[in-house]
Image (cartoon, rainbow, N blue to C red):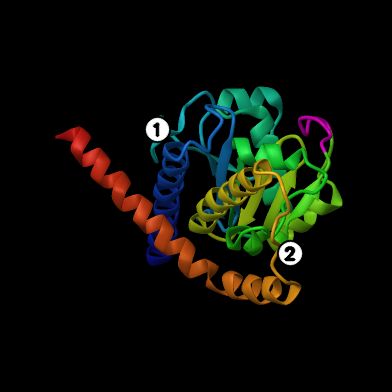
Amino acid sequence: MTDDFDSIKHCMDESLEKLAAGWQMLGSLRLIDSIFNHISVSFYASDGSLSLAMNPNGFLPEEVDAKALKTLPLRMYSIEEAIQSGVNPDGLRLHAQVHLARGVPGCIVHTHSANVVAVSCSERGLLPLSQTAIEFCGDLVFIDYEGLFRGHHLDAKLVGIAQNGGVCLLRNHGMLAVTSTIEEAVYIAYYLEESCRIQIKALSMGGDLVMPSVDAIEASRHELLADRNTAATLFFNALNRTRSLRRSGHDS
């Protein structure tokens, strides 16, 4: 029993460290809308139930370390309970609903990065103009803007994303990704923004654009998706090394 508890605690501590590190990384990459975006992870507690850890309300990413994260039993919370717990009520409502629909451990990241928001406002959405975008185009889900997710439940598309994992563009709003790992969540947030940035630059040039063939798009997409877990881990580790170097330089 003690070994099981120690193992669960180790997994929890590791998840919290990674979650805080990932949020700091996205902040340093300027993908976070100051204090208004959210990242969370769900994990098994010692009694076998799911708990949720989330960035605290009113804190910039660079302020958030593992100790600052808010850890709560996974359930729905009232506005007052969220405020008392130190978590943004709108963020907690959305993340708790998604984690509850998922039912197993996972990570959720929601951002308002500028180029993602811009592309989300376009009827065309994300186009397979770059190899970076090709990875996302076939599986990207689009969800129409319906306000701040207050007072209503997840629609069928969001339930599907919650249960199966995936990425969606929230029209006129931003992006939301549900993943099995924190590494993949950070990877998706960065490269989806890059895909949208490249598209905006390409369209700004005017004139005709060269579009890859359907066969090339499909082949590349499958290869990129097969490589994603490895690529996400390598990307996360590289960002973490540079983060550690910056902190060491600051401390010295």
- Compared to residue 31, the image places residue 85 above or below, namely above
| Residue pictured at 53% horizontal, 58% vertical | 184
Whole-percent x and y of residue 199? 65, 48
- Compared to residue 183, the image places residue 226 above or below, namely below
Whole-percent x and y of residue 77? 69, 33
Identified by mark 1, the residue type is Glu
Label 2 vs 1, first from the N-terminus: 1
For the stretch drawn in magenta, the main secondary structure is loop
How dense is the environment of label 2, judged by Cα within 10 Å: few (below 14), some, or many (20 and up)? some
Q: Which of the numbered marks, if any, corresponds to residue 245?
A: none
How dense is the environment of label 1, judged by Cα within 10 Å: few (below 14), some, or many (20 and up)? some
Quarter placement of the C terminus = top left
Magenta residue check for 78: no
Mark 2 and 1 residues: CB-CB less than 8 Å, in contact? no
The quarter of the displayed image where residue 246 is located: top left
| Residue pictured at 53% horizontal, 49% vertical | 190
Q: State which region is magenta.
A: 145-151
As measured in the structure, the alpha-carbon distance from the residue carrying label 2 to the one carrying label 1 is: 34 Å
Q: Which of the numbered marks, if any, corresponds to residue 62?
A: 1
Residue at image mark 2: 138
| Residue pictured at 20% horizontal, 41% vertical | 248
Residue 223 visible, this orientation: yes
Whole-percent x and y of residue 12? 45, 53
Residue 75 visible, this orientation: no
| Residue pictured at 66% horizontal, 46% vertical | 176
Secondary structure of the residue carrying tag 1 is helix
Secondary structure of the residue carrying tag 2 is loop
